[in-house]
């Protein structure tokens, strides 16, 4: 009995000797912490082990103790932007985090168009390499990984933006961050968490999908593929859950192409996903997203229906949508090569709505109302205070139908922020559709230069049959 007791005592002290304090990988040298906020530091240590933390911006030491699950967490108040700083974490061992900046942190998520980088082909980004190291930007790139349950750590490390690290990072994210850095004159931290081909279900906690009959039914229609996960929650658990303790300013999102066959539930799915992220971060995160681009899918109108759902998501508080139909040069390429202007338009939303530094128009005109005056249909728009204009002599991709639901190309006259639509074949307009197809590209813009978002005024059944 005495030997057993001595063995237990020896084991306890042996474990204590090797119970080094550990941090998750997202807490590391070169990171950016959200300025003027309460940010969390957390990790693991032997139960009961005392941990002291000292940040060089105020040199105050704060303390906490690891709990019975060998976990610890502490709140740290961050100052106004600046740096570089140092954080010392002292337990049985000592961890020194160097070259830390205080600034603004954003998550860049979605599928392949957010993932797209220098190596995959982005015109113009080669010109960025020489100056990349002069920008005060830091990157954290999530590896592609999945989990059935929420994880508390992920592989990866923070890197300083330079000519080498930029090549593997999201081009949209980079251009977004560059614009913020230049306009706000603060350090920018960008966390890239994306995976080409993934449907939005995998970025949403599984229980929220499984307990919603509409979302559950749509999820069952996702056939397994060899290159990306389709199981609800799997990338959320492995690529979002590990960083929800890390305070961020907001998120940008470019996804939707992989939900074209279940567009009827997409708006609800996105609202559910956004809500789950906000709950996890415990804040009303700004969420700015890209409307999917024109592309020739193999079924009728499935892209149009996703774009329609994305427009509906604008009713969700603190969201913004970038329309990019004018940035597409090849509708046979699902990855439009112009990533710079996509990033800049996302940045303009953030600068205006999150930071209050609006420089000009950043919202595309959105359909507001439809009225009929004789043989004319009148469409009014939000976000067109300066008026509308055509780029070209005749309007493209706009159609009008009567009660027979047969659509004809429309003639358009512009009066301020109203378009007047008519057709000799339609005596009384019942519905108008603009750029409501997979690959159609319209040419109606605000006078500020932003494309009108695709729309339809009807709720008639839409043909989504195969093109083959």
Image (spheres, grey):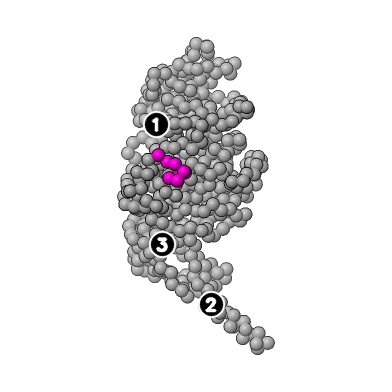
Total marks in image: 3
Q: Is residue 103 magenta?
A: no
Residue 441 x %, y %:
47, 27
Closer to the observer: label 3 or label 1? 3
Query: Which numbered disc flags the more N-terminal residue, 1 or 2?
Result: 2
Which circle's residue, 3 or 2, is located before the other in the chain?
A: 2
- Report how far apart the C-alphas of labels 3 and 1 lie in the structure: 40 Å
Q: Contact, CB < 8 Å: mark 1 with mark 2?
A: no
The residue wearing badge 2 is 16
- Label 3, label 2: how far apart the Cα atoms are: 26 Å
The reply, left or right, for residue 21 in relation to residue 182 is right
Relative image position of residue 237 (x, y in whole percent): 57, 53
Q: Earlier in the sequence, mark 3 or mark 1?
A: 3
Q: Which residue is mark 1?
A: 450
Residue 121 covered by magenta stretch: yes
The magenta-colored residue range is: 116-123
Mark 3, residue position:
29
Q: Label 2, secondary structure: give it.
A: helix
């Amino acid at each position: 009995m005495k030997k057993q007791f001595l063995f237990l005592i020896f084991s306890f002290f042996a474990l204590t000797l090797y119970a080094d304090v550990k941090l998750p990988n997202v807490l590391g040298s070169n990171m950016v912490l959200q300025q003027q906020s309460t940010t969390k530091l957390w990790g693991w240590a032997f139960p009961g082990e005392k941990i002291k933390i000292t940040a060089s911006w105020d040199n105050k030491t704060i303390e906490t103790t690891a709990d019975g699950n060998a976990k610890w967490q502490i709140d740290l108040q961050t100052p106004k932007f600046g740096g570089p700083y140092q954080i010392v974490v002292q337990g049985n061992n000592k961890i020194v985090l160097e070259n830390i900046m205080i600034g603004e942190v954003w998550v860049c998520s979605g599928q392949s168009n957010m993932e797209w980088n220098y190596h995959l082909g982005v015109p113009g980004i080669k010109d960025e390499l020489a100056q990349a190291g002069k920008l005060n930007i830091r990157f954290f790139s999530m590896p592609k990984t999945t989990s059935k349950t929420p994880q508390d750590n992920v592989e990866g490390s923070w890197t300083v933006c330079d000519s080498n690290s930029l090549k593997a990072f999201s081009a949209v994210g980079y251009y977004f961050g560059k614009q913020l850095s230049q306009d706000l004159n603060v350090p920018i931290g960008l966390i890239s968490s994306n995976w080409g081909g993934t449907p939005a279900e995998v970025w949403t906690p599984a229980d929220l999908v499984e307990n919603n009959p509409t979302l559950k039914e749509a999820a069952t229609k996702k056939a397994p593929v060899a290159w990306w996960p389709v199981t609800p929650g799997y990338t959320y658990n492995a690529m979002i859950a590990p960083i929800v303790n890390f305070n961020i300013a907001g998120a940008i999102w470019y996804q939707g192409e992989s939900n074209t066959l279940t567009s009827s539930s997409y708006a609800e799915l996105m609202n559910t996903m956004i809500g789950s992220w906000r709950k996890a971060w415990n804040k009303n995160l700004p969420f700015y997203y890209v409307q999917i681009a024109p592309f020739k899918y193999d079924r009728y109108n499935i892209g149009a229906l996703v774009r329609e759902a994305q427009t509906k998501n604008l009713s969700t508080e603190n969201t913004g949508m970038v329309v990019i139909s004018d940035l597409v040069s090849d509708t046979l390429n699902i990855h439009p090569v112009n990533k710079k202007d996509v990033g800049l338009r996302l940045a303009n939303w953030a600068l205006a709505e999150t930071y209050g530094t609006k420089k000009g128009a950043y919202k595309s005109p959105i359909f507001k109302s439809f009225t009929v005056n004789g043989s004319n249909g009148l469409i009014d728009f939000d976000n067109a205070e300066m008026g509308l204009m055509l780029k070209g002599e005749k309007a493209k991709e706009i159609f009008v139908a009567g009660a027979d639901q047969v659509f004809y190309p429309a003639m358009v006259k512009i009066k301020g922020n109203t378009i007047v639509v008519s057709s000799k074949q339609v005596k009384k307009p019942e519905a108008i559709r603009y750029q409501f197809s997979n690959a159609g590209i319209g040419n109606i813009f605000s006078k500020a230069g932003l494309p009108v978002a695709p729309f339809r005024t009807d709720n008639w059944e839409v043909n989504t049959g195969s093109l083959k």
